[in-house]
Image (cartoon, rainbow, N blue to C red):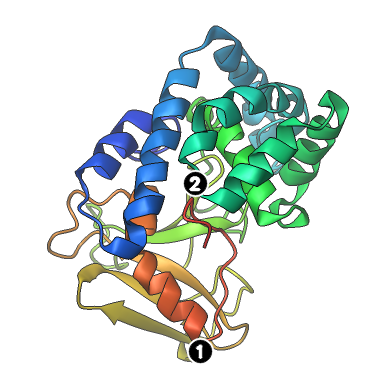
């Protein structure tokens, strides 16, 4: 699939959606913080140094795709420029962050340049290696570079990649999307996973768990909420993991932007956590 609307680098569309949502109390503060984050990322994405770093990160994406070497982006070259963005992000966004997150940001920028780069390298290798609050700050600073790099790269087709991790940057999916596409009637509407790190989309089987790979449809159960008929939790009984799915075929889903509406539907995550379920790719609400 070609890059979708509000896909990699489309901070403006996401910002527009985040500003337009009237959120319930639980999601109001996370959405307000998301607006600040997207405003920062949109501004930084116009900086020449950021765009140059993104171009270097995407340089080998096509050759890597031809030899099926994943992830396609050169994350090693991205580490230093991402670390260099940390100070600006914490200075601009620290006052809008909840207390513990603000403290984590101050702790991050208080470290030496070498320590910051080592943390970024660890996060690029596996986001779960870091404390979630530190990981969130690095995700905020990395967004402009990784997303612009992803936007310059052609994502693989379904025949090339249906793995559990993002083929562009290697991260776990943040959410799932079902769309209506022309010519898909006989095969059913396709499902895509959405990466929270580079905002890339990739094809993924409908009845398969993106956490553990379980493909017995009897072990995958959907749970919907009345408030959002186009949003649901897909639970895997095998691993007790879940992913939030947005069905863009449903009425009222026309304006949905998955990486934004994931934050706005925080109540679904609260319910899932009460059931003892876990998710891999955290939203910018921290869950």
Residue 102 percent coordinates (x, y) = 59, 43
Is residue 206 visible in the rendered structure shown here? no
Quarter of the image where one finds residue 212: bottom right
First in sequence: mark 2 vs mark 1: 2
Which residue occupies the foreground of this view, 93 or 64? 93
Determine whether 247 is above or below 130 in the image.
below
Residue at the limit of the structure toward the top, as seen here: 48
Do labels 2 and 1 touch, CB within 8 Å?
Answer: no
Q: CA distance from mark 2 to mark 1?
A: 27 Å
Determine whether 271 is above or below 219 in the image.
above
**What residue is shown at x 42% (from left), y 24% (from top)?**
42
Residue 65 percent coordinates (x, y) = 64, 36
Q: Is residue 96 left or right of residue 130?
A: left
> Residue 157, which numbered label?
2
> Residue 183, which numbered label?
none
Residue designated by label 1: 219
Which residue occupies the foreground of this view, 71 or 116? 116
Q: Secondary structure at mark 1?
A: helix
> Quarter holding the N terminus?
top left
Label 1 neighbour load within 10 Å: few <14, some 14-19, many 20+? some
Quarter of the image where one finds residue 185: bottom left
Residue 99 percent coordinates (x, y) = 56, 50
Q: Secondary structure at mark 2?
A: loop
């Amino acid at each position: 699939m070609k890059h979708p609307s509000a896909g990699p680098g489309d901070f403006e569309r996401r910002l527009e959606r985040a500003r337009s949502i009237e959120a319930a109390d639980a999601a109001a503060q996370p959405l307000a913080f998301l607006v600040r984050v997207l405003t920062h990322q949109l501004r930084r994405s116009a900086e020449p140094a950021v765009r140059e770093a993104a171009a270097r990160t995407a340089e080998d994406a096509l050759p890597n795709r031809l030899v099926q070497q994943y992830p396609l982006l050169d994350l090693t070259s991205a580490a230093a420029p991402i670390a260099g963005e940390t100070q600006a992000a914490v200075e601009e966004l620290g006052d809008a962050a909840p207390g513990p997150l603000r403290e984590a940001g101050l702790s991050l920028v208080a470290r030496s340049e070498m320590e910051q780069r080592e943390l970024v390298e660890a996060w690029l290798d596996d986001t779960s290696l870091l404390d979630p609050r530190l990981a969130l700050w690095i995700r905020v600073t990395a967004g402009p570079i990784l997303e612009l790099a992803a936007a310059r790269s052609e994502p693989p087709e379904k025949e090339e990649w249906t793995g559990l991790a993002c083929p562009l940057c290697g991260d776990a999916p943040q959410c799932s999307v079902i769309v209506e596409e022309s010519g898909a009637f006989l095969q059913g509407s396709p499902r895509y996973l959405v990466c929270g790190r580079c905002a890339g989309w990739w094809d993924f089987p409908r009845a398969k768990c993106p956490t553990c790979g379980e493909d017995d449809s009897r072990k995958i159960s959907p749970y919907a909420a009345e408030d959002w008929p186009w949003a649901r939790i897909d639970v895997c009984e095998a691993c007790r993991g879940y992913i939030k799915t947005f069905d863009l075929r449903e009425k009222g889903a026309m304006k949905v932007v998955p990486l934004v509406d994931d934050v706005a539907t925080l109540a679904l995550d609260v319910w899932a956590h009460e059931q003892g379920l876990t998710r891999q790719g955290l939203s910018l609400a921290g869950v």
